[in-house]
Structure formats: C-alpha cells, structure tokens
Image (cartoon, rainbow, N blue to C red):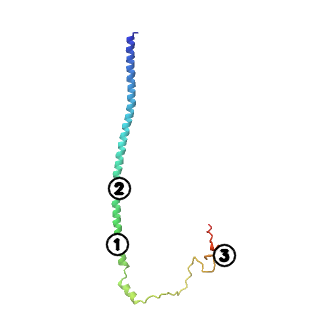
Amino acid sequence: MDETNINWVLAIACLLAGIGIGALGYHLLNASAGNTQRLRQRLAERERELAELKDGMGDSLERIARLAESLHRESQGLEQEAEEARDRLGARSLRRQALDAVAPAPTATPTKTTTEPAVPRDYADGNRGTLSEDFGLKNGEEAATPQPPRY
C-alpha cells in the first residue's frame, strides 16, 4: 500500500472514532440534562401544590376565626341571659318578703328533738384510740421527733 492511502484510511478512522466519541459524550451529558429538566418540573409541581395548601390553610384559619368569634358572641349572650334570669328568678318576691316579715325570726340555737345516729368522724375523742393524734407515739424523746410514715 501506498503511504497516501494509509494516511487517508487513518484520517477516516480517526474521523469515525471522533464522531462516535462525540455522540457518546452528547448522549451521556444530555441524559443528565433530561433528568435535570424532570427534576425542575417536579419541583415546580411541588411548589404549586404548596401554594395551594397555603391558600387553603389561610381560608381554613379565617373560617375558624369567624366561628370562634361567633361562639364568643353567643357565649356572651348566654351569660347575659343567665344574669337576667338569675336577677329575675333569684329576687325575692313580694309575697315571700311579706311572709318573712310576719313569721317570727328563727332561734339562734336549734334543738334536736329526734335522735339521729352520730355521724362517723375521722378523729378520736380523746380516748387514745387508733384515730387519736398521738397513737403509737411513746412518751419522751420519740414524741418530740416524729418518725416518717412507713408505706
């Protein structure tokens, strides 16, 4: 073969290799660009969803504030009605006032005419029983320094 033919073959082979390497590089770089484009699109969708949620949250909070305000107004109205009813119903009527004026005043010390059983007490009446304050204490030094309770 001739040297000129070898140069032409070598130039064509280098050209084809360069085209192949360029196509491979473009494919690899373009794939990451496509991935970046998809990520940007997903980010834009998430931002739009977030903006919609914020708008919805603002509307919801506004509605809650209106409901709380109306609830407050209604509770004030109920309080006023309760005060009016208390004043109206709690006031002594003229008839009751007249009966109280005619009736004799009650005695200061009521007397028991019926025998009722004694109400149970949670203390002792001084007989040093188990409910007395000094039950279980010994005379002398131990009475001055109480021991902590045992559980």
- Callout in the foreground (3, 1): 3
- The alpha-carbon separation of the residues under discs 2 and 3 comes to 73 Å
- The alpha-carbon separation of the residues under discs 3 and 1 comes to 65 Å
In the rendered image, which residue does mark 2 sit on?
A: 60
Residue at figure coordinates x 65%, y 74% from the top left: 141
Residue at figure coordinates x 39%, y 32% from the top left: 31
Q: Is residue 145 above or below residue 47?
A: below
Helix, strand or loop at disc 1? helix
- Horizontally, residue 122 falls left or right of residue 102, namely right
Which amino acid, by three-letter code, is at mark 2? Ser
Q: Using the image, tell me which numbered label, if any, was put on residue 81.
A: 1
Along the viewing direction, whichever of 47 and 126 lies nearer the viewer: 126
Q: Position of residue 50 (x, y in %)?
A: 36, 48
Note whether residue 136 is visible.
Answer: no
Q: Position of residue 92 (x, y in %)?
A: 37, 82
**Quarter occupied by residue 39:** top left
Helix, strand or loop at disc 2? helix
- Horizontally, residue 7 falls left or right of residue 114, namely left
Quarter containing the N terminus:
top left
Quarter containing the C terminus:
bottom right
In the rendered image, which residue does mark 3 sit on?
A: 140
Along the viewing direction, whichever of 90 and 31 lies nearer the viewer: 31
Which amino acid, by three-letter code, is at mark 1? Glu
Helix, strand or loop at disc 3? loop
Label 2 vs 3, first from the N-terminus? 2
